[in-house]
Image: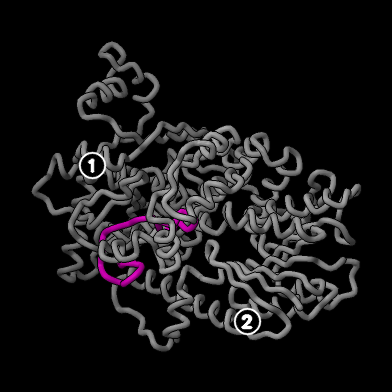
Amino acid sequence: VYVANEGVNAQMSVPTNVMSRFLQCCTMKPEEGGELSHVLGTYMENGINIDPVPVDMGEFQAKPAFKNLHIRVRSQIVADGFATPLDWQSAGYDMPPLEWHQKLKEAREAQEEGVENAPLPIVLDCRNDYETQVGKFELAEPLDTENFRDSWDVLKDRLKDVPKDSPVMTYCTGGIRCVKVNAYLTQEMGMTNVSRLAGGIISYDRTLFEQAPAEESMFKGVNYVFDSRMGRRITDDQLGTCFTCGAKTHLVTNCKNDNCNKRMVQCENCSDSFHGTCSEGCKVRVVNAGMVPNRERETTNDAVDETRQESNEVYTNVDDYSSGYSTSSPALFRQIELNTAALLPSGAHMVSGPTQGALLKMLASQTSGRILEIGSFTGYATACFLEGAAIAGELVDRKDVGGREGGPFVLSLERDRRALGIASVHIKAMSEFGLGEDSAEEASKLADGPIVDFEGDSVSFTYKGIAGCEFLRVNDALATVEEMASSQSQLAPFDIAFVDADKTRLMDYVDALAGSDSLLKKGGLIIVDNVLWKGLVIDANNNGYESSDETTPTGSHEEKALWKKNRRARKLAMKMHQFNSAVVKDERVEVVMMPIRDGLSLIRKR
């Protein structure tokens, strides 16, 4: 249940034997037994959306749609990125499902018959790309966004040359996102003939099932839903393209490697052969872990961890045993992961995670604590390095705060102002409250307010009165590193340089760092992340990859978009393989590649 000033959005599983009582409570008048109707009734838009076909009890018990009740207070039901909200009551015509159905049927017939000058509507799918890959209405154009707040630029580009009175029909899953889209179209873009599907795909599905069962559904494939089912199959059409093999499928899943958790479209055969993972690298990780699902780790306080470690839990493999008897991460790190997943969901898999983070902290603690981080993202690795730098300062009984001129100090470079704004909140919480529950609680407030992009050029923090930390906003991190390497600044040499930046220029970073003792001291470490690139470097090594070998598919818009994504992943894997091949032959350094997370190369400068 999400609660915000703009409204309430609730999704829940209700047993069929109490469904009538549930509806009575929510919708009937108080005198008829509707205890909540005075709160909900007049404010509910399009009533309560109910799936047309109940979930079988055996299926529900095996994989419940929801496991627990969660009530979250948010600044917005759906984050839209607007500084000032629009008037959601002025959002075009709320078109009933059967009228929507008829409009699409007529438009399809006109298109098939080649009727000249037929006023065909522009039908826009307001959902994100992973949703539209497995199901959509006929004639619909997906916006192909990774996040909803990216919709506005796409809409401006798509409709820039369209007459203002052209018919535009929009839809989404449950009717929330298309309200915001239509408010934007009418109030910001001046469109005058805008309508939206009342209640979204869920309402259409139920209405057609109950009131016009003989009609062919104009929605094809699977309606992606935001619970553990991940989709309701409306028709047998398979619109999705398997991320792994390219076959047609309707299945959406998440990579079973918890440290990856990539959302993907994957066919049943590949899901079986890859054990539910997205790549060979993740498959090896899951297989080595015995294919046993991760134990529940939703609580991270010390008492729970102590109880777990002192229990008689049975381990089936060395990896799981090692994880079970490693020191648990403090609460702040888990909150950073949660904030990243909520605020930058497409990059949630990019945080370092507990195992890699612990390694980074330990490496930093064994130096003088001077760290150059190239790529801050949301600050997970930054916090690990800062903790390690403070430990290094404590070991030598450091009395003053480190900075650019010397002492324990983390300098972190980042280009993305949104990521930098989030990272600075995390490190501010760490500097003021430490790493425990108080810090995590402070950081959790980030999800309740509007996301504020980083302003200015830099911001500095102090941790434990020992280690300094500075975020530096840059346009080109490599140019900044090369400038630092060649200048005669007061910047003392670093012990470690962590490179999690542009994967196409990694060797240029190594050249700058290895070639300047004033930037990275002799014997210093260059740590490069993602060197296994989802396991695709194995194929790059064995088979190579040339973009000229591939022909652009002539299929649907969705197929082309997915092909571009997979092509980009293979190209980057080839770049990463070329870097790995080059750096291991470089006589200035020695390299140890570690199969942690997505691969980590420790490169010691000779």
- Which picture quadrant has residue 268? bottom left
Residue 338 picture location, percent across and down: 54, 45
Residue 72 picture location, percent across and down: 49, 34
Q: Amino acid at mark 2?
A: Val
Instruction: Kindly tell me whether residue 388 is visible in this rendering.
Output: yes
Q: Amino acid at mark 1?
A: Glu
What residue sits 64% from the left and 53% below the top? 358
Q: Is residue 474 left or right of residue 49?
A: right
What residue sits 47% from the left and 40% below the top? 77
Q: Is residue 51 left or right of residue 446?
A: left
Task: Specify start and end residues of the magenta stretch as a single range.
Answer: 240-262
**Which of pointers 2 and 1 lies earlier in the amino acid sequence?**
1
Q: Residue furthest top?
A: 31
* Quadrant housing the N terminus: top left
Q: Are marks 2 and 1 in contact (CB under 8 Å)?
A: no
Residue 243 falls inside the magenta stretch: yes
Residue 149 picture location, percent across and down: 50, 53
Instruction: Kindly tell me whether residue 545 is visible in this rendering.
Output: no
Q: Secondary structure at mark 1?
A: helix
Residue 259 picture location, percent across and down: 49, 56
Characterize the magenta stretch by its predominant secondary structure.
loop
* Residue 434, placed above or below residue 162: above
Mark identifier at residue 584: 2
What residue sits 17% from the left and 45% below the top? 208
How far is mark 2 from mark 1, CA to CA?
Answer: 51 Å
The residue to which callout 1 is attached is: 59
